[in-house]
Amino acid sequence: MRKLAMALGGSAVLVLAAWSLGRETSSAQGGRATPGAAALDSTTAPVLAAADTARLKGPRQPIFFRHDIHAGQYKMQCQYCHYSVGASSEPGIPSMQTCMGCHLVIGGADSATRAEIQKVRDAYNQKQPVEWVRVHYLARHAHFPHMRHMKALGPTACATCHGDVTRMPQVFKVNNITNMGWCIDCHLEKDVSRDCSVCHY
Amino acid sequence: MATNSSEQSNGGMNRRKFLSVVGVAGGGAAVLPGCSTDRVQKLVPYLIQDENQVPGLATTYASTCTECPAGCGLHVKTREARAIKLEGNPDHPINTGALCARGHAGLQGLYNPGRLKSPMVRNADGSLDPVSWDDALARLSQEVARAGSGTRVISGAGPGTFSDLLAAWTQALGGRLVRYQPFDHEPLRAANRRVFGIDSVPSYDFGRAKYILEFGADFLETWLSPVEHHRGFARAHGYHDGEMAKFVSLTPRMSMTGMNADEWHPITPGSEAAVALAMANVILSERSGAPSDANALRGMLARHTPEAAAQEAGLGAEAIRRVAREFASAKPSLAVAGGIGSQHRGAEMLCAAVNLLNYIAGNVGQTIDFGAPVPTGDGYGALEALTSAMRDGHVGLVIVHESNPAYTVPATVQFEAAFTRVGFKVSTASVLDETAALCDLILPNHHGLERWDDLRPRPGVRSLMQPVMEPVFDTRATGDVLLDVARAAESGPLAQFTAASFEAHLKQAWVGVAQARGSTDPEQFWVDALARGGVFEDSPAAPVVSLAADAAQIVATAPAFDGDGDLVFMAYPSPMLFDGRGANKPWLLENPDPVTKVTWRSCLELHPDTAKALDVREGEILRLTSPHGSIEAPVYVYPGLHPGVVATPLGFGHTAYGDYAQGRGVNALDLLGAAPGAGGGLGFVAYASTRVRTERTGRYQQVPKTEGNPRQLGRGIAEAMPIGLAQRGLTPKEAHYAEVGGEPHEVNTERELEALAGFAEAQEHAATKGDYVGEHPQWGMVIDLARCTGCSACVTACYAENNIPTVGEQEVLRGREMSWMRIERYFEGGEDPGEPVEARFVPMLCQHCGNAPCEPVCPVYAAYHTTDGLNGQAYNRCVGTRYCGNNCPYKVRYFNWFPYNERSFPDPLHLQLNPDVTVRARGVMEKCTFCVQRIRGAQNRAALEDRDLMDGDVTPACAQACPADAIVFGDRMDPESRVSRAGRDHRGYHVFDALHVRPAVTYLAKVRYQEEG
Amino acid sequence: MAVMAHETHVPTQTHAEVTRDVVATLGKPSRGYVLMLAGAIGMFVVGLITFVILLKDGLGHAGYTPPVMWSVYITTFVFWIGIGHAGTLISAILYLFRSPWRTAVYRATEAMTVFAVMTAGLFPIIHIGRQWIFYWLLPYPNQRYLWPNFKSPLLWDVFAISTYLTVSTVFLIVGLVPDVAAVRDKVSGWRKKIYGMLALGWTGSDTQWRHYTRAYLYLAALATPLVLSVHSVVSWDFAVGLVPGWHGTIFAPYFVAGAIYSGIGMVFTLLIPLRKAFKLEHMIQEHHFDNLGKLTLLTGSILFYAYMMEYFIAWYSGVSWEQTTFYLRAFGPMWWAGWTMIICNAFVSQLLWFKKIRTNVTALFVISIFINIGMWFERFVIIVSSLGNDFVPYAWGQLTPSWADWGILVGSFGWFLMYFLLFARTFPIVAIQEIKEMIPMPRKRPGVLH
């Protein structure tokens, strides 16, 4: 029935045209590497507790993992955790083992942090992997080879699409990457292939 | 969307557990329309990173195929720790990289919805109920202890460490093991025993043969080692530099193998032996050079004159003489017999006669290698003996392993009745087959891709099997079950088996293997062997073979047929379903039979004249009645048949074995008598042993075949030329005129030619604009019809690689099959009486036209030309006007009339989906993409390595699978690429050249031995 | 327009009577009318349900049998486009040619045109695989930088049809204005209000008439070329394709002739009962039918010629697949369809050589039914039998239409008749003011005039 609705909705073509134009401009405003939540200075991340996650942008995660602390304050390379991004189409999600590599030792400065880190340890000990809420999707008929983009744009290019996570206590979607226009803009700018079958097959 | 259950169905975290990123590993079901991105999805990380698994990259494991006894080597492609594609292992001596349709479909055995999800036990009320492994094993141990030496084991497992263990285990109990294969080629063995005194089946080297003579051995389909034979046959019979072997087939029914013959003679069923002996007679009396001890045969052979044989076989004596002389003068040559299809009561005599023929022509030791015998079981006789033992109630416990006798022996044997008299019946079937359904306890075995083992298909070849992923269901390797039982019985005969697991046991065995080869580091040896797929060494030198004493005591008497019907009934093995084990795999059911092009069910094949005489048309349901039973099935009229024969494939008509198999087609065995008294006691099942009465029912059933019209109406789709003309280097067109006479005349006027030239120029120019600027490969393909045998391995490979849905019988009836690659089969001749009928195969796939008719008519640019010369199809852009489908001259565009993507991958079949390929939703057009995902993958790899693509970097699934190497793929812009070189062959032509669509696929005309017109 | 005054067949009534009679058709609906309307709506509902099912499960319910990828839906689409043509021909071209006999019938035919095109317009949506994104066929700016393919005849269709629909609708509305005014003056209450609005404040003043006739003339001139263009474009859907049986240069004229032929057929089918129901015998007279009959004969004969040409060319070309296609069209599995088309169109139309038949309303009605059937089958044969047996014999397939095909076909007729009947109820089905124009200016005599 959704289809029927869409079919009927489709008849309002001009409306759609206007709408799609609107979408383009809005995504343009979204811009690249928009600074994340609040104006944070890049060296030290603010002190926040899980309780604060509600007012932060983006979905709440089972564990209040702080990209701004790991990637921002401690300047860890994205590739340290997202290990396969340079080699594969998939960036790779760090295994619990990777987390424990540090957090066996690092227990956290304040009580709030300790609480969160404790969750990681428990999860690992109970052999229960954490189920992160996914933030960035692509439609499944669009193939995005991460490694090609890393190769072409360098290891710091992540922010181009994902925004500056070094300033995000909680990761949120900065750019409308599900929108084909987002890809095309860049491919035009960089003058790389816009052949459909490069991504759609 | 098929994806989400894929995570659930794999609970627990451990090694080889895949990263469940939906849409990354989510069954690859990139389902259109991909508007599901607003749903909340979870990213579940590994607990511990598996060093073998990088998300998004395929990991390949070497293993061994268990779909038939041949024992081909596999390369199993896994993504996120799920097997998604099977390919041949290039290092493996049996199949050297190729794989048949059945082998590819092994994947659907792994993910089969019909698989048992846990052990089952029969309860008081007689129903089978799930049970825990502990209870099941406890029950088994107890029963084993009770039965002790009364234990009997029926096993279809090929020779290997597991079989050794099973044998030793049974021995220890004092029980008996019956190694039973339905197609065990007992006549062949018996004949070797009788003629050469060697009790084994040799391996045959078709590659060296210059002349091949077939008496009903479908060596390209089910006979012994089909893929190996394919590779040899393509080498010998594939036309190259003016040479090719000649292949003559003498069988009542032209099988797919027979379709590849240069001459096919429909001889009377049962007359083969006489013909073979007559040929032997001709050779022995006319030629010298036969081994000296052959002289002992003169007397016996003299009785078999060509005239007499010709009389019996219904073919000219001259033909027999000619073939015999050609056979003798081509050295080495090869004659083969003993196929299941022609396994009549005289089969042993037939094989013996052919042995003599080979021996006299000096082929034994040349093309026939007794040094490398192929694995065989104990034969049907052993099963018959066991059956009567069971009937008399002497058997306390039966364990049935990888075998389904309740289905594979004729009903007249009354195996079922005997079986049910056994005290306790155990099955290790992973699918509830006919035999398992009768059992009291079912301990589902791991699939071949889930367990450890090794196979020895040849002396010198030890082919390893390893688990490539976590078990799909709660099953257990039977090897472990045996060891568990042994462990449970602290004392007693089984106590000697102490290995902790079958894996340990296997490794232990391989320590021996390593030491035997003087390896100092067994662990390293093992790792290397795993990576390679096993150890592959040359088989020991062939022994010197001479005639046995009673070799001369051969008399070819026409075999007896039960019943008084006027048609001889031939049950031939289906190239897709083999002995019936393929019947639960939709890929095999939908892949049309190479000969009849019928899918999803079995039909009764009749010669056109016979059909006329009986006044039946295709689709009318006919009842066949033999003394042993009767079957009803629709008629299929097939010219490649002896008029006195009605044929139907084996492997259908299951009464159990999962929803796909159940009640599909008819079981040909119902017409056979093999019980003692009714022609039994032969030591084998005589599949062609009855005469049948026919009876019209007046009911009709449309035949689900994929062919529209079997004649190509002179449209030059499947071209062929006589070898004489090929040797003169003629093109198909020239060859045509050389045959029918006349001169090739240019039909176009000056102006037309000018226009065409101008048009072509404009096309070239257009191809230098926009994205098309610069160096791009232009992908192309060459298909050599002289090598293609029509085996359809490429078809299943394509289904597997490209997530092609199977649509089912009802949709096939409406011509809606989705097969991107189809093997068209055309008949030539055979219309007026006496004219020989000839079959030609042509694989038809998207031709990726340079000037494609489908592209300009698409209103939304879903069909468009890519920069690298592909005819692109953007599924997510397609709105489904189907104009492209209408305008495609090759009819290779397929439309999703229904949501096939949701219907044809029931859990867990969706786990086989290739994550790199979008699963097409309903309402969009799809077609062959030249495996664009492989092209892009290769380009990505090359880019990471800062290099250009090299020739051979990209191999589409079809080319990779082809056992005959008939398909070459590559860049047409590179003059040195294999595809460019192959394309320059004088036999090259494009289908429908007159349309000027400039296809990227070049066909090389077939070459035949035939009189030039 | 005084030129028209000296015409034979002058209506015998006064202006007042004309208005009265016509307005009378807008009175209380008869039982027969209500039943017909109910039937039409019922048929439409059948189609609607079928469409919803197709939308839910996919096109598979229809009888499509590859390689036949187009079948009943496209057939019906072309059929309705064809129907549309007679309207414009009669109302516009004959207007330009100043043939007065059109006046009585043109309003009805024009309405028929608009509704037929409306019906046809539905099919491109119904027949595509993913109906809910049909708007991708239209050029509109979007963030993907994607445009439709202007090389594709289907896109030409989109433009041809929308243009045709717009122009003929405007033409119909403009033609209505004075009559609506006349009605407005006859009725009272809320109806007066509505007609008042639609009359756009028409007073019948001199200036208004002067502008009005100009405007009407220009619109007629604008509509005329469309009669030829639209169906030519539709014919190219096929002629541009490679499919044997489609790939012919005669398609444009062949289709246009066929369109007009089928259109007039439909005019007969609609007008004859209507004339009876609304008692308009004295306005829509036999000579009108006589003339329409001649037109039918002409176009029918053109079709006859085209059919013969198709076969001749197929034989003369010496191209194997062309010959096979046309052989099978006559003697293949679809022979019945092929012969239906030839008999109903080529042969039946020849009966119209006889004036007796041309002026016999009953005979014409029967013939018109044959024409409708024949023309539907013409498209069916061209599409289905050609696709069924084209280049690759191995892939040949024969179509068997299913309930879904018939459901949509019935629905389309329902949709069309529903609108037509509603129109006939609501607006003057005969052009009042043009009839009046043909009446000589009356001498002083009691009776109200406008």
Image: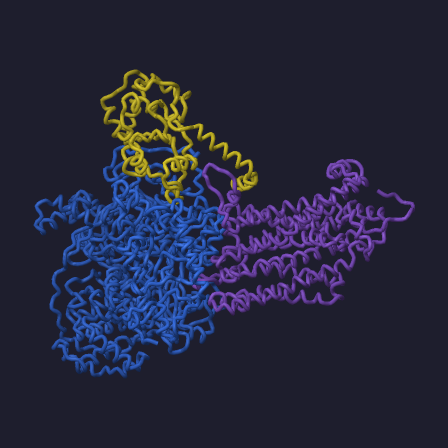
In the rendered image of this protein, does residue C157 appear above or below residue A129? below
Q: Is residue B360 left or right of residue B139?
A: left
Q: Please provide percent x and percent y for residue B711.
A: 42, 68
Residue C364 in sight from this viewpoint: yes
Q: Please provide percent x and percent y for residue B517.
A: 9, 51
Q: Is residue C90 left or right of residue B728?
A: right
* Location of residue A108 by image quarter: top left
Q: How many marks?
A: 0
Q: Which chain is blue?
A: B
In the rendered image of this protein, does residue B596 appear above or below residue B450? below
The foreground one among B365 and C255 is C255
Q: Is residue C49 left or right of residue B741?
A: right
In the rendered image of this protein, does residue B333 appear above or below residue B85? below
Residue B152 in sight from this viewpoint: no
The foreground one among C333 and A14 is A14
Q: Please provide percent x and percent y for residue B224.
A: 24, 62
Q: Residue at x 29, y 31 (%)?
A: A155
Determine the residue located farthest toward the right in the rendered image.
C445
Q: Please provide percent x and percent y for residue B563.
A: 36, 74
The foreground one among C174 and B513 is C174
What tint does the image give chain A?
Answer: yellow
Q: Residue at x 30, y 61 (%)?
A: B984
Quarter of the picture containing the C terminus of chain C is top right
Q: Residue at x 29, y 50 (%)?
A: B954
The foreground one among C166 and B216 is C166
What tint does the image give chain C?
Answer: purple
